[in-house]
Image: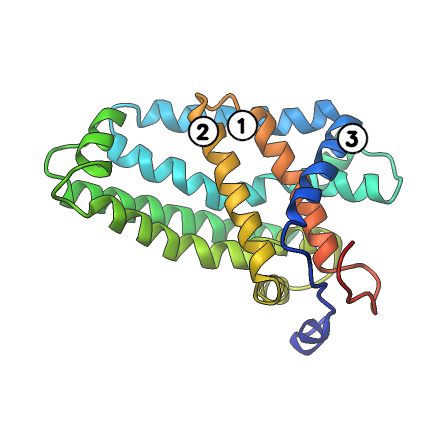
């Protein structure tokens, strides 16, 4: 599929609260394959705990590392997209589905994963440098971060930190929100998948804005619960992302309509 074909690909126009139905469908998928789904959440929880352990006394680094987690999480949910696709097709879905997608070593997915890792690394470095250089005292603990970054009365550091994070996160979200499920589902290039993903966001700014807020909110809840909430949050968001892709970019041509 070339860029011209991607530009002509029908994109459904969704209702503002359509993302809520993606969460509902996600829980249906989780009920069908609970072990696989929650195992993905457990792996991501362990990954987050390792990051927190490594940087436990260096919150100037941990703040960026945990927020950067949002950038790389979509590629970690690749197995969940494959499982949701199999369930949609009434095919056997389980560990074999996940193993098959990862064993394929699809170069497109590897490339996209490296790009997300680069974006995450860039943000971690930017966040660490910003906090280290602009905070009035060393920020080594969450209390330091709250006191000297978030609520410091004479500093705009937290606002600057959020603004820079948003500047990086927004294009990453627009580039990846449907791109990775599309790479799992169709034989398209990384560039074409990113282009299609941007089209879904630009043509559905309100529902995709709602989806971005839901993703961030649930992820922050997961991170804020000593990572344990990620066991439930990450499979929910992973499966829901597949349904977002399917609603926005339907499999059959000629279905460009308002989703019901």
Residue position marked by numbered label 1 in the rendering: 230
Name the residue: 32% across, 48% down: 162
Disc nearer the start of the sequence (2/3): 3
Most foreground residue, 125 or 236: 236
Q: Which residue is mark 3?
A: 94
**Residue 49 x %, y %:** 43, 23
At a point 69% along the width and 53% down the height, the residue shown is 245
The reply, left or right, for residue 118 in relation to residue 183 is: left
- State the image quarter where residue 240 is shown: top right
The residue wearing badge 2 is 223
Along the viewing direction, whichever of 10 and 36 lies nearer the viewer: 10
Q: CA distance from mark 3 to mark 1?
A: 20 Å
Q: SS of the residue at dot 2?
A: helix
Work out which residue is located at the far bottom of the displayed protein and give it.
4
Q: Position of residue 98 (x, y in %)?
A: 72, 35
Residue 177 lies, with reference to residue 146, above or below; the image says: below
- Are circles 1 and 2 on residues that touch, CB within 8 Å? yes
What element does badge 1 sit on?
helix
């Amino acid at each position: 599929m070339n860029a011209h074909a991607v530009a002509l690909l029908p994109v459904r126009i969704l209702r503002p609260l359509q993302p809520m139905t993606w969460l509902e469908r996600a829980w249906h998928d989780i009920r069908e394959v609970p072990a696989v789904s929650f195992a993905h959440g457990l792996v991501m929880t362990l990954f987050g705990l390792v990051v927190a352990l490594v940087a436990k006394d260096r919150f100037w680094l941990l703040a960026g590392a945990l927020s950067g987690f949002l950038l790389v999480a979509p590629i970690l949910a690749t197995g969940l997209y494959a499982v949701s696709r199999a369930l949609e097709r009434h095919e056997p879905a389980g560990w074999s589905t996940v193993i098959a997608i990862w064993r394929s070593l699809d170069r497109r997915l590897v490339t996209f994963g490296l790009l997300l890792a680069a974006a995450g690394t860039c943000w971690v470095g930017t966040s660490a440098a910003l906090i280290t250089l602009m905070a009035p005292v060393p920020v080594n603990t969450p209390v330091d971060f709250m006191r000297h970054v978030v609520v410091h009365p004479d500093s705009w550091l937290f606002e600057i930190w959020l603004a820079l994070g948003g500047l990086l996160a927004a294009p990453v979200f627009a580039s990846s929100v449907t791109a990775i499920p599309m790479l799992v589902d169709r034989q398209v290039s990384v560039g074409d998948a990113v282009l299609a993903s941007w089209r879904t966001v630009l043509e559905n700014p309100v529902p995709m804005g709602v989806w971005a807020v839901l993703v961030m909110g649930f992820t922050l809840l997961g991170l804020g619960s000593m990572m344990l909430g990620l066991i439930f949050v990450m499979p929910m968001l992973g499966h829901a992302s597949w349904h977002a892709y399917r609603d926005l970019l339907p499999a059959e041509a000629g279905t460009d309509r308002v989703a019901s």
